[in-house]
Amino acid sequence: MRRCAGEGDAAVDELAMLDALSVVRVPWLDPPMVVVSTFGNVGIGWVVMGIVLICMRRYRRVGIAVVVAIAVAGALAKLVIGEMVMRPRPCDVNPGFPLLISRPFGTSFPSGHAAAAFATVAVLVVSHMPKEVVIPSAIFAVLVAFSRLYLYVHYPTDVLAGALLGASVGVIVAWCMRPKADAERRAGPPSAEG
């Protein structure tokens, strides 16, 4: 049984999990998974969504929060955590597995695609965006995360860590960028002491 680099005997064999997942890999699903994953490359699809929101006066603050959250989550994922952990990708550990995309640059942990996707969704949820925007975005974020497993370029814990990192960053950024009136309303009435 193959183990991921640096993992002990008690660790879950994530490579075996990915190999088992390859059972759902069917030719008709390959192109959609490549497209979904490509949407998340460098967070570009999510950044475009943020730019569209910025262009709408009513949602400008939300759009800015989306772009900022993606930038912060991406920098933390790839430039800080990824460089500290230096986890090889599954396709590096098992080079015989046929890839449907070019080998992505950088290390495996955490998934930048999942970080960007879930940072966006967290901003949308905290900003109380309409469910017609939040629900499809959340579904697409899950698909982006799944595509990284399907394409054999991330381990399950990479995707989970990326999603948790992105969601955390998204919540913090959205909270910090909420309108002042909203912040004052949640703080309660001013004190009568003086």
Image (cartoon, helix red, strand yellow):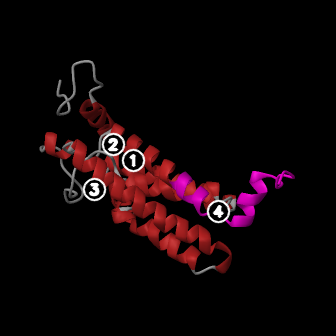
Please count the marks in the image.
4
- How far separated are the C-alphas under marks 2 and 1? 6 Å
Residue at the spot of label 4: 178
Mark closer to the chain start, 2 or 4:
2
Question: Can I make out residue 7 in this image?
Answer: yes
Q: List the residue tagged with mark 3.
A: 79
Q: Which of pointers 1 and 4 indicates the residue nearer the eye? A: 4
Q: Would residue 11 be found to the left or right of residue 33 on screen?
A: left
Q: Which residue is mark 1?
A: 162
Mark 4 is on which residue type? Arg
Q: CA distance from mark 2 to mark 3?
A: 15 Å
User: Up-down: is 31 above or below 110?
Assistant: below
Q: Where is residue 94, by image quadrant? A: top left
Start and end of the magenta stretch? Answer: 170-194
| Circle 4 crowding by C-alpha within 10 Å: few under 14, some 14–19, many from 20 | some
Disc on the earlier residue, 4 or 3: 3
Residue at 62%, 55% (x, y): give it: 125
Magenta stretch holds residue 133 = no
The quadrant of the rendering that contains the N terminus is: top left
Q: CA distance from mark 4 to mark 3?
A: 27 Å
- The amino acid pointed to by label 3 is Leu
Alpha-carbon distance for marks 1 and 3? 13 Å
Please report contact status of discs 1 and 4: CB closer than 8 Å, yes or no.
no
- Tell me the element at label 1: helix
Residue wearing tag 2: 158
Q: Residue at 38% of width from left, 61% of height from top?
A: 40
Between the residue at mark 2 and the residue at mark 4, the CA separation in whole angstroms equals: 30 Å
Query: Which of marks 3 and 1 precedes in the sequence?
Result: 3
